[in-house]
Image (tube, rainbow, N blue to C red):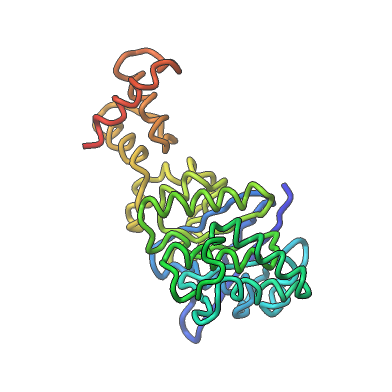
């Protein structure tokens, strides 16, 4: 595979505290990789090391075959890596356009920078707020502005830090659609996220950190089948995985790699009827999926 990012034995210490220890994984180009873990697992520290906010104590960060371990954030950004922060860092007294323009001017002269800024503002659903002060935006709009600022630097790799934090269910759906849209135009995404359903639905790979160390990595199916381990970390487990785990424990064996509600419904339909759930029986499958979750 073509790795756009390689993390090699990444260790970061703050005095006697080890925030990350020997973390190693790859991010393949044109994929979405989710990083999950409990509070204090070292997720944001790792992001800060990758993006140059602080240097690793030991280990390496390789971006497009170039060692960027000791590089400054501005230089890393110029190579094609953008990032957001969990708490949006908007310039509240400036307009939405001015906020994004500041980021775009790091790569283009004024005319092209303005064109780029206006394009990403529209892409991020902020066109109607382009002249408004950033401080007047709501939480979702500020999250969109944070993403727009990052996109204005024209990244090949985008680091998203807890984009869903503080959002309602409907707002999360909107934010998820934006992430898919950005990825569809060729941007690789590495995201820290605590909403497991979203990680499951959008990620090609999931990396689990605990205590600053890499605990496990794999596809969403490979990771979320480990129900007991994830529970021990106080992480939410997708409902379908929880249900299949409970049914198996109760003596009704279910495949341990089912993490999607529709898959669970089809498997349960087959268990109850002895027949494969046909495509035409979707409504029946949905009825079956709804019953056991109470």
In the displayed structure image, the side of residue 1 where residue 246 appears, left or right:
left
Which x, y percent locates residue 222? Answer: 49, 42
Which x, y percent locates residue 244? Answer: 33, 34
In the displayed structure image, the side of residue 276 where residue 187 appears, left or right:
right
Residue nearest the viewer, comparing 283 with 31: 283
Q: Which residue appears farthest toward the bottom when viewing the image?
A: 15
Residue nearest the viewer, comparing 294 with 116: 116
Where is residue 83, by image quadrant?
bottom right
Which x, y percent locates residue 16? Answer: 47, 84
In the displayed structure image, the side of residue 245 where residue 197 appears, left or right:
right
Q: Residue at x 70, y 69 (%)?
A: 114
Residue 12, compared with residue 22, is above or below; it is below
Residue nearest the viewer, comparing 212 with 244: 244
Q: Residue at x 51, y 83 (%)?
A: 14
Q: Residue at x 60, y 69 (%)?
A: 149
Where is residue 285, by image quadrant?
top left
In the displayed structure image, the side of residue 232 where residue 119 appears, left or right:
right
Which x, y percent locates residue 9? Answer: 62, 67
Residue 10, compared with residue 292, is above or below; it is below
Residue nearest the viewer, comparing 46 with 292: 292
Q: Is residue 20 visible?
A: no
Q: Residue at x 37, y 63 (%)?
A: 166
Where is residue 6, by image quadrant?
bottom right
Q: Is residue 14 visible?
A: yes
What is the quadrant of the C terminus in the image?
A: top left
How many numbered badges does the structure rendering display? 0
């Amino acid at each position: 595979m073509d790795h756009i990012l390689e993390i090699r034995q990444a260790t970061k210490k703050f005095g006697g505290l080890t925030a990350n220890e020997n973390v190693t994984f790859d991010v393949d180009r044109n994929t979405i990789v989710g990083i999950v873990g409990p509070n204090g697992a070292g997720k944001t520290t790792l992001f800060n090391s990758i993006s140059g906010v602080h240097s690793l104590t030991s280990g390496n960060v390789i971006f497009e075959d170039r060692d960027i371990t000791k590089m400054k954030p501005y230089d890393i950004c110029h190579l094609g890596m953008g990032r957001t922060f969990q708490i949006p860092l908007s310039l509240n007294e400036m307009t939405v356009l001015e906020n994004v323009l500041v980021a775009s001017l790091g790569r283009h002269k004024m005319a092209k920078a303005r064109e780029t800024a206006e394009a990403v503002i529209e892409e991020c659903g902020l066109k109607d707020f382009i002249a408004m002060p950033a401080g007047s935006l709501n939480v979702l709009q500020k999250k969109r502005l944070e993403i727009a600022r990052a996109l204005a630097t024209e990244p090949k790799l985008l680091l998203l830090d807890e984009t869903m934090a503080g959002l309602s269910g409907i707002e999360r759906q909107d934010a998820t659609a934006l992430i898919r849209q950005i990825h569809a135009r060729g941007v690789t995404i590495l995201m820290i996220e605590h909403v497991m359903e979203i990680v499951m639905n959008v990620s090609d790979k999931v990396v689990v950190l605990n205590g600053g160390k890499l605990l496990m990595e794999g596809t969403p199916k490979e990771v979320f089948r480990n129900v007991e381990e994830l529970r021990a970390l106080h992480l939410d487990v997708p409902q379908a995985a929880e249900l299949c785990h409970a049914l198996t424990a109760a003596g009704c064996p279910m495949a341990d790699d089912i993490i999607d509600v529709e898959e669970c419904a089809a498997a349960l339909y087959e268990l109850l009827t002895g027949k494969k759930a046909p495509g035409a029986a979707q409504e029946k499958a949905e009825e079956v999926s709804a019953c056991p979750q109470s």
